[in-house]
Image (cartoon, rainbow, N blue to C red):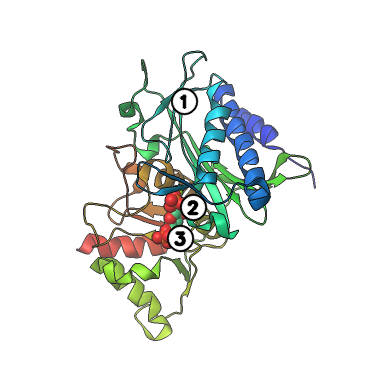
Amino acid sequence: MKRVSLTQYLVEEQRLHNNIPAELRLLIEVVARACKTISHSVGKGALGEVLGSADTENVQGEVQKKLDIISNEILLEANEWGGHLAAMASEEMESIHPIPNRYPKGEYMLLFDPLDGSSNIDVNVSIGTIFSVLKAPEGMGQPSEADFMQAGSKQVAAGYAVYGPQTMLVLTTGNGVNCFTLDREMGSWVLTQRGMQIPAKTKEFAINMSNQRHWHPPVQRYISELLAGDTGPRGTNFNMRWIASMVADVHRILNRGGIFMYPADLRDTSVPGKLRLMYEANPMAFIVEQAGGAATDGKQRILDIQPTKLHQRVPVFLGSRDEVAVVTGYHQET
Ligand code: AHM
Ligand code: MG
């Protein structure tokens, strides 16, 4: 097999589509390098003394794990000095992180969830890093949160790394979705899947069933119809998977189809779901759409949502487009 490295892929992609200028290539390579470092820490586990809680809380009131903080630091440090960014934002930081004045500034802005799937960190189940890249608005001075308030359709790149049995990087720059596998001995990313496509139809769904009693009627209806199997209105049996790491659930869906859901529910109607729009839902929605799937908040395309807050939450329905259409249709009827 002729090996295509991440760098070669990015250079060739730029020649073909003229959509990865040198600064963006540097950005993607720096993020990918940071993910290698995170992968190394994750892989050490107890031997690296990186497991367990850090006994601090993030802005969302969630207890941070040591690896949440370590991964955040790795991404910040890696991306500060290169001159490709104006600012960063992260799930683990309350406010945006402008590039310090001692470094040159670039025209991109990077958002990330440094380590997604926190409940799986200490139990050796797949976790990941999710990232989204925006362009700084024209003529931007000192970056502010308002500069980040751009719809997901404005993303110029998005991706995730999944730290599983293999470490993989899945990337889109708006021309399809490609997957790279980390060659641990060589320390390099090798292109292993080109043009990933999510089948339109599926018989597999992913949702945290323990929240069933709190769901809104459209979600109740949709899931009860799936559970009714071949004697129910759908006339077919559906299988369920729930890893509780969005990266791992989305990665399965990119490979064999499925629908992933994290709806809002009745527990606290002021909180629209669990997942965050800017650095979880938007990058995943971009990737999923680029692979031929769909992503909505139940009512509208996630990528069309105009954000109002950095840490805003959003209901998420994404994956195989025929199933996303069914559950979105049930919401639109009500
Ligand atoms: P996190 O960013 O704190 O890890 O939370 C996001 C994760 C997703 O990866 C996953 O889909 C979801 O939370 C699981 O939630 P639950 O524990 O309610 O099943
Ligand atoms: Mg997360």
Q: Secondary structure at mark 2?
A: helix
Mark 1 vs mark 2: in front: 2
Between residue 62 and residue 224, name the one nearer to us: 62
Q: In x, y percent, where is residue 48?
A: 66, 46
Q: Is mark 1 within 8 Å of ligand 2?
A: no
User: What kind of residue is marked 2?
Assistant: Ser
Of the residues under marks 2 and 3, which one precedes in the sequence?
A: 2
Residue 320 circle label: 3
Q: Secondary structure at mark 3?
A: loop
Quadrant of residue 211 in the image?
bottom left
Q: Is residue 57 above or below residue 8?
A: below
Q: In x, y percent, where is residue 43?
A: 66, 50
Q: Is residue 62 above or below residue 74?
A: below
Q: Residues within 10 Å of mark 2 (few under 14, many from 20)?
A: many
Label 2, label 3: how many angstroms apart (C-alpha)?
26 Å
Of the residues under marks 1 and 2, which one precedes in the sequence?
A: 1
Q: Which quadrant is home to the C terminus?
A: bottom left
Q: In x, y percent, where is residue 320?
A: 46, 60
Mark 3 in CB contact with mark 1 (< 8 angstroms): no
Between residue 261 and residue 100, name the one nearer to us: 100
Mark 3 vs mark 1: in front: 1
Q: Residue at x 40, y 24 (%)?
A: 136
User: What kind of residue is marked 1?
Assistant: Tyr
Q: Is residue 35 above or below residue 300?
A: above
Instruction: Name the residue beneath numbered marker 1.
Output: 108
| Residue 180 in sight here | no
Q: Residue at x 53, y 57 (%)?
A: 120
Q: Residue at x 60, y 46 (%)?
A: 50
Label 3, label 1: how many angstroms apart (C-alpha)?
31 Å
Instruction: Name the residue beneath numbered marker 2.
Output: 118
Is 59 positioned to the left or the right of 42 in the image?
A: left
